[in-house]
Amino acid sequence: MIVTLSETAAILASAQRVVITAHGNPDGDAIGSSLGLMHILRSLGKDARVLLDDDIPAIFAVLPGYDIIGRPSAEEEPLEADLVVVLDTSTDRTGCTLQAVKAPHLLNIDHHQTNDASAEYTYVAPARAATAEIIYDLTRELPVKMTKDMAMCIYTGLATDTGFFRFSNTTSHTMRAAAEMLDLGVEPNVISESLEQKPYKTVRDIGEAISMTKMFADGHAAGIFLDEATTARMQSTEAFIGMIRVIQGVDIAVVLKVKEKDICRVSMRSKGIDVSRIALQFGGGGHTRAAGCTLLMPFEDAKRTICEAIVKAIREHQDAQTKRENP
Ligand code: AMP
Ligand code: MN
Ligand code: MN
């Protein structure tokens, strides 16, 4: 059932024990919006905690509450709560969290246009740059006094999902929300310096990955394709896509890596072509300009499959453009 922002606030207000979770391979928005909401609910006297079924990168240690993020266990007795809140994804990408918690109600808050609205209550706002921006909206619906701790978490979600306020999803509302977070004491450099830190090896890996870049679709697409052995050698591949997204003439950038044998993870970025539609074809999702999916096939098959889908999307986009120019 789709709910409004004020209904979302009312659902949160009526629960006492709240478990908050988000997608695996958590990013700044998943972690920032989760911890932000946790601080907000705790300030309202609730028993709120964050459970994430994945490792939390140490760069997020700058965020208040990082140390108390829990990891759900499907083996232990389920944790009892009044409400589970899933943030920044549909309910499917939450690992074992939903099995590890027993709660009568499930609320999903997200900004992905591909959200499947499968939760009991779903609030989706695709016009918001980050789930953290929706958490900010909720602070105006709840009787909460904002603190620096909340602001640091919300600011991190806003900043990371907008490429530090550079991407097309950045709106004046995003900037106003961020400005309020600065008024509450957030120091942007403290957040960015922490998030940008990389081990020396990762910087070397970025160099190696860039040198592996393949151009295709007549220069309209660029990809980095990491087979199983290469993926295993590299600690972090997060930064790769941003490096090739900037190549002149490239409409779609893609990074494919082999997570495990026959499990290939794909990240895509575009300058306008809807890559969430490509991701949806393979059971993934995301936004127009940033999307991802997982292909359950061997490396070479996955590489061919995603490249064909990208070439097709680019061709369709070009055909539509030609039709618009010569009706
Ligand atoms: P990534 O390339 O992993 O940074 O993801 C880009 C965007 O697509 C993010 O907003 C993700 O949350 C979303 N996304 C990535 N993978 C999936 C998936 N399997 N299902 C739904 N959304 C996804
Ligand atoms: Mn996310
Ligand atoms: Mn997000």
Image (cartoon, helix red, strand yellow):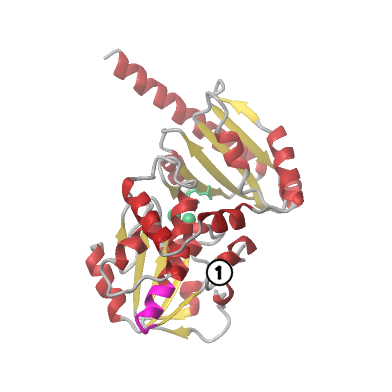
- SS of the residue at dot 1? loop
The location of residue 19, given as percent across then percent down, is 43, 77
Give the main secondary structure, helix, strand or loop, of the magenta stretch.
helix
The location of residue 279, given as percent across then percent down, is 47, 44
**How many numbered callouts?**
1
The location of residue 196, given as percent across then percent down, is 61, 52
Q: Residue at x 43, y 48 (%)?
A: 286
Q: Which of these two is toward me, 247 or 2? A: 247
The quarter of the image holding the N terminus is bottom left
Instruction: Name the residue that disc number 1 marks.
Output: 53
In this rendering, the answer to whether 33 lies above or below 272 is: below
Q: Residue at x 50, y 39 (%)?
A: 269
Tell which quarter ligand 3 is in: bottom left
Q: Amino acid at mark 1?
A: Asp
Q: Which of these two is toward me, 16 or 264? A: 16
The quarter of the image holding the C terminus is top left
In this rendering, the answer to whether 121 lies above or below 236 is: below
Visible in this render: residue 301? yes
Query: Is 326 on the left or on the right of 20, as rendered?
Result: left
The location of residue 115, given as percent across then percent down, is 37, 55
Quick one: which residue is furthest to the top in this view?
Answer: 326
**Which span of residues is magenta-colored?**
38-46
Visible in this render: residue 93? no
Is residue 202 located in the magenta-colored stretch of the structure? no
In this rendering, the answer to whether 173 lies above or below 323 is: below
Query: Badge 1, how many Cα within 10 Å: few under 14, some, many 20+?
Result: many
Q: Residue at x 55, y 29 (%)?
A: 221
Q: Which of these two is toward me, 228 or 39? A: 39
Q: Which of these two is toward me, 142 or 146? A: 146
Q: Residue at x 38, y 77 (%)?
A: 41
Query: Is 320 on the left or on the right of 199, as rendered?
Result: left
Query: Is 322 on the left or on the right of 259, as rendered?
Result: left
